[in-house]
Image (cartoon, rainbow, N blue to C red):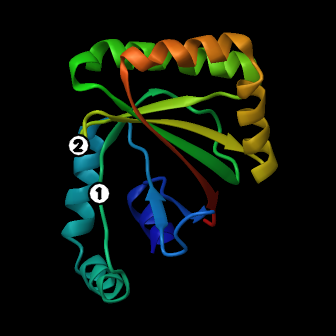
């Protein structure tokens, strides 16, 4: 269905499955340059009777779904077969300062690992939950990024300084793109 939507509406959906987490999680992600473009896409597919039938079929096999709009503040580079999504939570009293810190942290991490680390902040949903996104050719490539960061003194100092702006919540998901 996502391939047809990509072809018919010019979207860029990717489908991925979570590795090392819930076997029932399926991630569908797409990118648009503006919210107006996204709105045009939504208007087009919701007006198409063929996709309304398809969405009804999806509802019969999907237990739960969620739609969240995020804004890419720093692009993660070219999509590869595997992705890591590291989620942190900015303290409500430090939102602007925390996001600025996160942009700088993504730049530092990119310089340490040699792989672009992206930053996505929510437009809808939980406004304080931010996501760092990285791509790699393998699971080991994702793990290598983590190990390089953990061994780097500058990263450790930066991570310790983040405690003032971030809650003590941080999770990592590994995903594999299947289409």
Q: Residue at x 46, y 68 (%)?
A: 2
Establish if 116 lies above or below 81.
above
Q: Residue at x 71, y 25 (%)?
A: 149
Q: Is residue 118 visible?
A: yes
Foreground of the two, 29 or 49: 29
Q: Residues within 10 Å of mark 1 (few under 14, many from 20)?
A: few
Q: Which residue is mark 1?
A: 67
Position in image of residue 33 (x %, y %) = 38, 35
Q: Is residue 114 visible?
A: no
Q: Judge left or right: residue 170 versus residue 97.
A: right
Foreground of the two, 20 or 127: 20
Q: Secondary structure at mark 2?
A: loop
Q: Residues within 10 Å of mark 2 (few under 14, many from 20)?
A: few
Q: CA distance from mark 2 to mark 1?
A: 9 Å
Closer to the chain start, of discs 2 and 1, is 1
Position in image of residue 140 (x %, y %) = 81, 48
Q: How many marks?
A: 2
Q: Residue at x 23, y 46 (%)?
A: 125
Q: Residue at x 37, y 87 (%)?
A: 61
Q: Judge left or right: residue 46 versus residue 17.
A: left
Foreground of the two, 121 or 23: 23
Q: Quadrant of the C terminus?
A: bottom right
Q: Which residue is mark 2?
A: 124
């Amino acid at each position: 269905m996502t391939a047809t939507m990509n072809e018919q509406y010019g979207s860029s959906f990717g489908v991925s499955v979570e590795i090392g987490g819930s076997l029932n999680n399926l991630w569908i992600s797409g990118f648009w340059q503006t919210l107006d473009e996204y709105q045009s896409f939504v208007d087009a597919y919701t007006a198409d009777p063929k996709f309304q039938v398809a969405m009804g079929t999806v509802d019969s096999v999907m237990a739960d779904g969620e739609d969240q709009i995020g804004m890419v503040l720093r692009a993660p580079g070219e999509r590869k077969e595997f992705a890591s999504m590291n989620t942190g939570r900015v303290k409500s009293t430090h939102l602007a300062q925390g996001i600025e810190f996160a942009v700088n942290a993504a730049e530092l991490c990119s310089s340490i690992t040699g792989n672009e680390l992206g930053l996505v902040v929510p437009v809808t949903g939980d406004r304080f939950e931010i996501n760092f996104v990285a791509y790699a050719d393998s699971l080991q490539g994702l793990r290598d990024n983590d190990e390089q960061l953990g061994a780097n003194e500058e990263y450790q100092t930066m991570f310790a300084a983040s405690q003032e702006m971030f809650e003590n919540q941080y999770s990592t998901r590994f995903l594999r793109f299947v289409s």
